[in-house]
Amino acid sequence: MNNILSFFQESSERVEHFLDKKFVNSSIYTVKLTEGMRYSLFAGGKRLRPALVYASYGIFSDDYDYVTPFAAAIEVIHTYSLIHDDLPAMDNDDMRRGKPSNHIAFGEAEAILAGDALLTKAFEIMSDYTVSPNIPDNIRVNAVYKLALAAGDLGMVGGQYADIAAEGRKATSELVEFIHKNKTAALIECAVYLGGIAGGADDKQIEQLISFGRYAGLAFQVIDDILDITSSSETLGKNIQKDINSHKATYPAVYSLEGAKNKAEQYIDKACKSLESFGDKADTLLSIAEFIMERKS
Amino acid sequence: MNNILSFFQESSERVEHFLDKKFVNSSIYTVKLTEGMRYSLFAGGKRLRPALVYASYGIFSDDYDYVTPFAAAIEVIHTYSLIHDDLPAMDNDDMRRGKPSNHIAFGEAEAILAGDALLTKAFEIMSDYTVSPNIPDNIRVNAVYKLALAAGDLGMVGGQYADIAAEGRKATSELVEFIHKNKTAALIECAVYLGGIAGGADDKQIEQLISFGRYAGLAFQVIDDILDITSSSETLGKNIQKDINSHKATYPAVYSLEGAKNKAEQYIDKACKSLESFGDKADTLLSIAEFIMERKS
């Protein structure tokens, strides 16, 4: 476990160094916009998605800097999604990672625009020759396409939409699966995919990586749902039991707490099995899967 | 003028045919999300930005279908920006193009998500081999990069941010110029740029096209500000005199109505001069500049 924590630490440092240079103010008229974006970007998340990009890429190469723009772009997308999810019209969360949410700290219009700017920035970063001159164009186009699919109406936004539409209604297992596959797993799957194509994975390997990402992503969300019930506000850094109070479609609501734990274990097993052919080259990804299963916050 | 209206008509048809096929529902859980996106996409705008992509591309080739994905992507970005701008926390407009705004028709959370999904979709479209197999990867990456720059914190979102931050404060000419250069002109400039690089313009030609786009975009916004004062609600299809009532930073507020008209004429002159070396190949772009100057809605 110590090894994986130091891998997370190194991944964070690489990505944060990159983001720190990329998000600088350019005009006296947008000082607070940049500040708002940085507020949420540097709020101290786990950087799980960048770590997954690096771990997947690490199967093929240890030249980690090469893939940092992809790792950073996906974290930027994740950050935008948290800002918009917290908005009053959406989940109406006033705390995030132990601090006031972006719209509490900066205002609602400002938070909407910070989110819009972050989402757009992710695609700027992916396509910017100056920050990644060596990534071939075909890989870059492929990466932009898959990130857009994972983040948009056929992925994350679609999942968030279904989540909001389901509030207060009885959740079925199909609906919960749809929400979490799209809202959470799509971007996690994409992180593993981006590491793979940047590393030069062949079609068969890409398929195995995607399978790992999807199941690890689903497990991540089941554990998230469970922690919302069992964890304390301080540990989690956000308001808890919100899901229950707003009758969200969650795994525990459909399968009970015990059933949800079993479900998470099954997902993690499937994720790990997907990587068998990589042997010990996949150790870091496997450790991240273990981390997802055992995390407490 | 008749010629340019039929050019607009043909541009609209090409783009709408493309968008109609691209925006189809994929799941029973996101029916209303797709509906919300289509509601604003097909609200009957002028399709000025696609027309500019086609007119710029038309300098080099008449194979217009080739560049349709770029024309569509920029219209999709424009549409998302209107949905988010109209939100209660932003400009709080309940009418758009003679119909209830997206958040009035679908709800606020739904409008935020429809906007997010549209913004993401633009980049999916730009990088999708299946809809544009013949665009070379380097053009595609370049196009994604420039569109992201034009739409994000260094462009449109930055301009909208400065616009909101300036409300109720005395506007200077520098501030008004910053807002309109970024909020409006950046995307119009990008439309002309995208047509140019798709058509194979050289560096010098790209520079001239960008100059045209920037000045035409600034003129467009000055006329918009003027129409907000002089036009009727019915003609414009949205609430008028909102800018004055909310003390927006506009050209008439800084230069007076007459001064603003002169400013628009100067911008249009500069725009047209930028294209001199293209000769009559630039006639369509010049006619669009004239249309921008003379439009009544």
Image (tube, coloured by chain):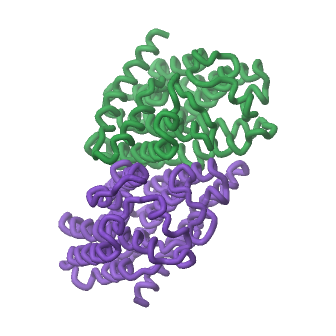
Chain colours: A green, B purple
Q: Position of residue A256 (x, y in %)?
A: 79, 23
- Res. B148 visible in picture: no
Q: Nearer the viewer, residue B201 or B239?
A: B239
The image shows residue B185, relative to residue B59, as above or below, that is: above
Which residue is located at x 49 percent, y 26 percent?
Answer: A48
The image shows residue B171, relative to residue A226, as above or below, that is: below
Which residue is located at x 24 percent, y 66 percent?
Answer: B206
What is the quadrant of residue A211 in the picture? top right
- Res. B247 visible in picture: yes
Q: Position of residue B130 (x, y in %)?
A: 50, 59
Q: Is B4 on the left-hand or right-hand side of B275?
A: right
What residue occupies the far top of the structure in this picture? A2
Q: Give the tally of numbered discs.
A: 0
Q: Position of residue B78 (x, y in %)?
A: 47, 61
Q: Position of residue B136 (x, y in %)?
A: 35, 59
What residue occupies the far bottom of the structure in this picture? B2
Which residue is located at x 32 percent, y 33 percent?
Answer: A66
Which residue is located at x 46 percent, y 15 percent?
Answer: A4
The image shows residue A243, relative to residue B256, as above or below, that is: above
What is the quadrant of residue A178 in the picture? top right
Q: Quadrant of the C terminus of chain A?
A: top right
